[in-house]
Amino acid sequence: MRDAAPQTIYLADYTPYGFIIDDVALHFDLDPRKTRVKSRISFRPNPDASDHTFFLHGENLSLVSAMIDGTPVSPEVTPQGLTCDVPDAPFVWEAEVEIDPMGNTALEGLYMSNGMYCTQCEAEGFRKITYYPDRPDVMAVFTVTINGPHPVLLSNGNPVSSGKDTAEWHDPWPKPAYLFALVAGDLVAHRGSFTTKSGRKVDLNLYVRPGDEGKCAFGMQALKDSMKWDEDVYGREYDLDLFNIVAVDDFNMGAMENKGLNIFNSSAVLASPETSTDMNFERIEA
């Protein structure tokens, strides 16, 4: 199915989304061809909005089920998303969809490359993961559970729990969907730490494919330097317990600065004194 042609959106036409989202829970059962994504989202009417039509973006999704407050519903589905009648009061929307990461050649949303799952949600890729108001002015707190037979299962925020083939993450700070991130694969971590100006320790991980461990030291130091620079110049202290970076050849863009889980093409982070040029080091530091 071909994506819809881009539409020009003008600032003069802006209207607030009809609903406020209090929290989002996502559950991923990873499979190369048939990944299941369950969402549980708490909505309430937005008093600042004039239009309370319930519309969720969604592209290339196979809807398995949908419920409102535990009751099955049959939304109207189009190639761009879905609409549904909803209560004029707070309610909980639940949906399950099936997606095809291996067949996702657009490299937007959740896709696979060389056995690794990766996301790219900027600018409007999240709508290829599940039905959601995929617009930058809709902010929400996310809790994410990932199930899959992979050594590393990552998402935004702080780790809540982990076990064999499962991990749960919670991001306490509201974010738009375009900053959502998920990575799952065979990766190894170059570890470090940073102490904030208030004395709080933040664990740092630079995840790479096996064999690239020797190229991480300069990138890790650049991360620490940039965190200190944010504090010195802007007075901004990092507000999570953990900062993860994934650096792999498979990422289709230069970098995506998702909150707490940055994803980079390896050329923008990894370097070794034996093979890298001064220009490589300058790019990483920048």
Image (cartoon, rainbow, N blue to C red):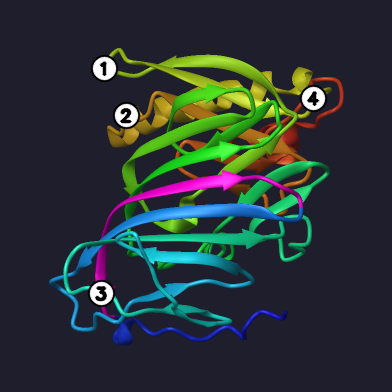
- Which residue is at a point 49% across and 86% down the rendered structure image? 8
Tell me the quarter of the image containing the C terminus: top right
Q: CA distance from mark 4 to mark 2?
A: 30 Å
Q: Which residue is mark 4?
A: 212
Q: Earlier in the sequence, mark 4 or mark 2?
A: 4
Evaluate if marks 2 and 1 touch, with contact meaning CB atoms under 8 Å apart: yes
In the picture, measured across the screen, residue 269 lies left or right of residue 168, that is right
Q: Nearer the viewer, mark 1 or mark 3?
A: 3
Q: Which residue is mark 1?
A: 198
Above or below: residue 78 compared with residue 35? below
Q: Residue 140's spot in the image, x, y percent?
A: 32, 52
Q: CA distance from mark 1 to mark 3?
A: 39 Å
Residue kind at label 4, given as amino acid type: Asp
SS of the residue under disc 2: loop
Q: Earlier in the sequence, mark 2 or mark 1?
A: 1
Q: Which residue is mark 3?
A: 18
Residue 142: which quarter of the image?
top left
Q: Residue 181's spot in the image, x, y percent?
A: 54, 46
Residue kind at label 2, given as amino acid type: Glu
